[in-house]
Image (cartoon, rainbow, N blue to C red):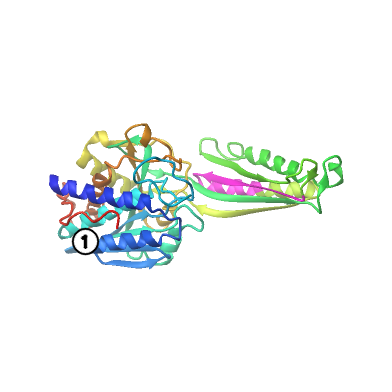
Amino acid sequence: MADEAQSLAQVLVGVRRYLHRHPEVGMEEHNTSRFIRETLEGYGLDVYGPIAGTGLYVDIEGSAPGGAVGYRADIDALPTQDQKQVPYRSQTPNVAHLCGHDAHTAIAIGVALVLHNNRDQLQGRARVFFQPNEEGLPSGAPLMIRGGVLEGLDAVYAVHVDPTLEVGRYGLITGPATASSDRFEVRIRQEGTGHSARPHEGADTVWIASQLMNQFYQLSGRITDARTPSVLTVTMLDGSEAHNVIPEQTALGGTLRTVSPDDRETIRTHMREIANRMESLHKAHVELDFEDGSPPVINDEAAIANVEATIRDTFGEEAIHQISESSMGGEDFAHYLKHVSGGFVRVGTASGPETSYPLHHHRFDLDETPLAPTSRLMARVLLNHLDRAGPETPSTGPNLTSTDNGTPEATR
């Protein structure tokens, strides 16, 4: 078992480092998809796809009939520069795996390998799938769903690395785990430009933009219950480049993040009303557009209970970290949970200063120690899920083996 565990660890570290060196942004993950396919086929698995452009999946059929459960990994990188000084740093300018999707992909490959080697213990079917474009819009999850990846599945699970948690711990929360994340843009226009000495002769688009920003910022906690988190942030403000010209158009944009679907709609409705009032009061054309992002991730109670019990059986009580508050980050795994139940789990990857930079930081990195243990854990979670859905519920989890093949070349 020790040799098998070491072999799996070597495989997954190699996979993660290859992907880290060769990142690709959303919907352009062609080499990533090829590498995933070749790696899995090298271990005797049949790989299906592409779906959603560059997405793939494998099905592991058990020796006994039963339900069907899924496991998802995202595979895309971010359009930003890797500033780490490590041998496996990104070799692609301005593209980098700074949100851990390389690790997610490696873990999912490990889940597939462990399940493939233990298919005699599998009661039903497990599907491991690899999704493009989690970071961008339109996100890859709805495309995968339209491609049929959820057909026949009872539930789906996923993990995300967490640099705020130490190695060996897993973060769990029932109910809302992340916020919805929508983009908005406002364009304020007047007829022609204005002179800074005579703003009364037209519509001061910059001033109107500033008033919109101030009023938008008053919505969270005033029209919504302050006990339910929401955050609206303006991140872009574009106008004139001349000091004495009031621009013909000023634009502002940002994100709206809410945990409650009702708050999401309430705030958006008030933003529209504010924009309409500003238009009627100040002789300007005000256009507000939303680009729908992901809804909140809502973790299923039974799915998280399954993960918690499996962590406790595998690593002990000390490995469980109960998360008390929803993350205000967005995650398109939420789209799957609108169709089937499931659980989204945080994986601790911090072991020192170099592995504690926040997600999306230019120097983000992670401790690779949890890759193989997390693969075995999530494979056991899927097996236990199917066992509980079957005719009998085992008192203890199955004794999993890791992989019976050698380590693939990590830099092919």
Q: Nearer the viewer, residue 334 or 132?
A: 132
Q: Which residue is mark 1?
A: 43
Mark 1 secondary-structure assignment: loop
Residue range in magenta is 248-271
- Tell me the quarter of the picture where residue 152 sits: bottom left
**Residue at position x 76%, y 44% in the image:** 242
Outermost residue, top direction?
A: 353
Q: Is residue 291 visible?
A: yes
Horizontal and vertical percent for residue 37? 30, 63
26 relative position to 368: left or right: right
Determine whether 42 is above or below 80 in the image: below
Horizontal and vertical percent for residue 91? 40, 50
Horizontal and vertical percent for residue 68? 28, 61
Q: Is residue 122 visible?
A: no
159 relative position to 185: left or right: left
Q: Nearer the viewer, residue 219 or 113?
A: 113
Q: As shown in the figure, which amino acid type bears the numbered disc 1?
A: Tyr
**Residue at position x 53%, y 45% in the image:** 257
Determine whether 164 is above or below 343 in the image: above
Horizontal and vertical percent for residue 291? 57, 55
Q: Nearer the viewer, residue 102 or 345?
A: 102
